Structure formats: C-alpha cells, structure tokens
Amino acid sequence: MRYVSTRGGAAPLGFSDAVAAGLAADGGLLVPENLPDLAPELEGFRGLAYAELCFRFLRRFATDIPPDELRDLVARSYAGFDRPEVAPLLELGPGLRVLELFHGPTLSFKDIALQLLGSLYARQCAVRGEAINVLGATSGDTGAAAIAGLTGRPGAAIFILYPDGRVSPLQERQMACTGAPNVHALAVEGSFDGAQAVLKEVFGDGAFRARYRLSAVNSINIARVLAQCVYYLHAWLRLPTELQAAAEFAVPTGNFGNVLAGWMLQRMGVPMRGFRIATNQNDILHRLFTTGVYAVGEVRPSLAPSMDIQVASNFERFLYYSSGCDAERVGAVMREMKEKGVYRFADFDRDTFTSSRCTDAEIPGIIRRVHRDFGYTADPHTACAFKGLDPSRPSVVLATAHPAKFPDTIRASTGAEPTHPSLEALKARPLVRHKIVADAAAIRGFIEAHAV
Ligand SMILES: *Cc1c(COP(=O)(O)O)cnc(C)c1O
C-alpha cells in the first residue's frame, strides 16, 4: 500500500516512510492510495481478540512490515491495557451501549493510537539503526499518551512542551513522573499557542531538524487514524446482528480524528449506520454539519479540555475522500480556508452524520443524569456524547477518558470522587519537569543537551 498527499503534490510513500514523515511534503495529509473492501472478510473477523483483529486489519496497510513482526508489534502495543478486551463494550440499556476507550496507560483514548505509534517508532529506530527525537506540544492528553508510548524505548527520546500551569495537575504528573531518562517534560511559560509557535520555529530550522532526526508527534499521523479504525470494527462485530446496521456511534470530537476513523471504516464496506459528532462549546464541527459553513472561531477553555479546538486538522482527509479524491480541489479549499478562515461545504452525506453541541453549563447535569439513570460515570468529554441521544435510535457512545482524570467536575456533578490506582500511584512519585521560556533558542539548547 502506498500513501499519497491529500493535495496531490508529493511523491507517494510506503507505510513506514508515511509514519516517519507525519505530514506530506506538500503540506497535505497522507492517505492510503486506496481503501480495501473489508465486506468479504467480516465473517472471518468474528470473535477475534482485539490484537489479532488489529493485526488482520493493519496488515493491509502496513505492507512493508513482515506479517509476523507486525503481529508481534501489535500484540505488545495492547498488552499493557488493563482489560483483556482492550476496548470493552458495555450495555447500559436495550439500545444504548458504551465503548470504553480509556483502558490504556494514561486513561484516555489517545493511548490506543499512541501505544501503536510508539512501537512503530521503536521499530523504525531498530531497522534503520538511527535514533530519533520526538517533539510535540500538548494541552494535555496527547502529550501524556505520546510519552507513555515512548517511555523507556531504546533509541528514542521524547520532548513534550506544555503551557506551565495550564494543564491539569494529573496530566502534568502523567508527563513528568515517568522517571524515565528519555522523557523530557518542558513546562513552557505562557499559553499553549505560544508553546506551539516555538515548536513550529524549531521544526522550521531544517538543518537542526535533520541533525537531531526530529519527528513530530501530532494528531495527523496516518498510523493514528488506522489504529482508531480497529475499535469501531471490534465493537461493531460485538453488536447484536439486528443492531449492526442500525446503531449510531456518538463520538466526542475535537480534531475530527476519531470520527474520521469510523467513517473510513464505513467506506471500507462495514455497514454502519453513521456518526453523531458531539462537540463541547467549541463547536466548529457542529456548526459545519448543521449549516455547511466551516468558520474558525476563538477557542474558549471548557470542562472537556481535550476538545478545545477550533481547527479540525483531520478534516482535510474527510474533504479529500468526500470530494472523490480530488487533490486539486482539496488544495484550493485549504488555501481558501487559510486566507478567509471560512469555507462553505455541502457535499457530505447527511444520512451518515448528525451532530450536537454541549456547553459547560450542561455538562454537569448530563453527568448527573447518566449516573442516576444508568449507574455509569461519564467523564466530561464522554458526557458531551450523551447529550441529545435520540431514544428511537440505537447508539454506541464512545467513552474517551476515565472519569478519574477529571475529579473536580465529577465531584461537582455526582458528589462522588472517582479514582484510579495508576493515578494514585503517580501522586507518590517525584515530579521531574523543566521550566523553560517560550523561545526557540532555549528549546534548541535543551534538545542539544538531551537528544539521543
Ligand atoms: C483528544 C480527545 C478527544 C477528541 O478527539 P479527536 O480525535 O481530536 O476528535 C476527545 N476526548 C478526549 C478525552 C481526548 O483526549
């Protein structure tokens, strides 16, 4: 399988090169050249354990990794999850299920993709005999999950920049208490946008990037999207037959990565009903799917911080596929969007998508109601997906974080204090972080001193 750019201006890459590159050379996103038809395989997938299913799915895409090696790599990536099912599907009522995606090491759904990506990076170091230095900026969950994916991996170091004092204390502990010498948590003065701007500047220095073999961790790596297709497939295979084509997946959404993965699977011939795009008060995607207008607004911090996003970077892949793989059109749209910040978009399938928006004022009430009605504790992100569910439509709600990551909101909503042993254990460990100014020279200096 080869990977092409959504903007059509870069040479196709193999899987491993696409994973290493992250972004296409022309600034577009990498996508598989064609999507396989899984319909004839679905019967044979029935009953497979998560890791085996993941392997059978990925081997169509990771064609440059020998199958035995891939099977092994996938098995190791999911061995650390605290449930044998990896992504358990719970039944709350006759038409209501929850797909729990937070059983990995950092208790958010980001682990599902980033544990696999960590294994792929480690393999790349081993195969090429070259170390890599992974660099990223985070407002919370992604940094923690990326770190967990690379902690203690030989040949890799990871540097994560986060805005000092603006991530939750538990998220900071997940990044700064690993005790691993190859992990560097950098508390940057100022905002997330500031941290991201310096990071861009560091990456913009081509000579520096090449000398330290820098790789970016971000939401657009194609391996992340492919890894996320698997939990939809795993859950779909476990639905009662009469619900398989009827159930709508309700997805807490920020960057559109999670929804995109489900939708790509549907395009691969899995008969799924569709998706509910559930945003928080940063509702760019809800506005898009109700009005057809994509208009970038200001980000307002919310109780579901991992969805505080106003530019849905994975949306470009959606645009590519829904325009019939017309790279020229995608390039033109992206230029227009960059210039005007607004884009009119109508050619999506309205039967497949519904959407909702959940404000901060609504989140605690939803958490309380779900707890009362079903005895289930939803974290603030998951709560957004419980909003406005149509009772006549069978639904699968994707639960993207463990409630113990957001103890204040849960306590205020239900009166109970959720805990998790892995978070309790972190509280006893020393915090090792480096305060640094938001300045490219300072960041480069730190990398020079700590790179592998
Ligand atoms: C990242 C994140 C999301 C949003 O996922 P996208 O792929 O950006 O749509 C939702 N919930 C949690 C807990 C997250 O960490």
Image (cartoon, helix red, strand yellow):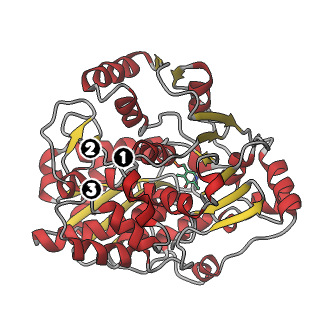
The answer for how far apart the CA atoms under marks 1 and 3 are is 16 Å
Residue at the image point whose x is 83% and y is 62% from the top: 374
Looking at the image, residue 332 lies above or below residue 270: above
Q: Circles 3 and 2: CB distance less than 8 Å?
A: no
Q: Nearer the viewer, residue 195 or 258?
A: 258
Residue matched to label 2: 23
Q: Amino acid at mark 2?
A: Leu
Mark sitting earlier along the chain (1/2): 2
The quadrant in which residue 135 appears is bottom left
Residue matched to label 3: 61
The answer for how far apart the CA atoms under marks 3 and 2 are is 17 Å
Mark sitting earlier along the chain (1/3): 3
| Helix, strand or loop under label 1 | loop
* Neighbours of disc 2 within 10 Å: few (<14), some (14-19), many (20+): some
Looking at the image, residue 249 lies above or below residue 374: above
Residue at the image point whose x is 10% and y is 72% from the top: 129
Decide if residue 67 is on the left or right side of residue 162: left
The answer for how far apart the CA atoms under marks 1 and 2 are is 7 Å
Query: Whole-percent x and y of residue 257?
Result: 46, 46
Circle nearer the viewer, 1 or 3: 3
Q: Amino acid at mark 1?
A: Ile
Q: Nearer the viewer, residue 94 or 355?
A: 94
Residue 397 shows in this picture? no
Query: Whole-percent x and y of residue 198?
Result: 34, 45
Residue at the image point whose x is 59% and y is 47% from the top: 245
Which numbered circle lies on residue 220?
1
Q: Circles 1 and 2: CB distance less than 8 Å?
A: yes
* Neighbours of disc 1 within 10 Å: few (<14), some (14-19), many (20+): many
| Helix, strand or loop under label 3 | loop
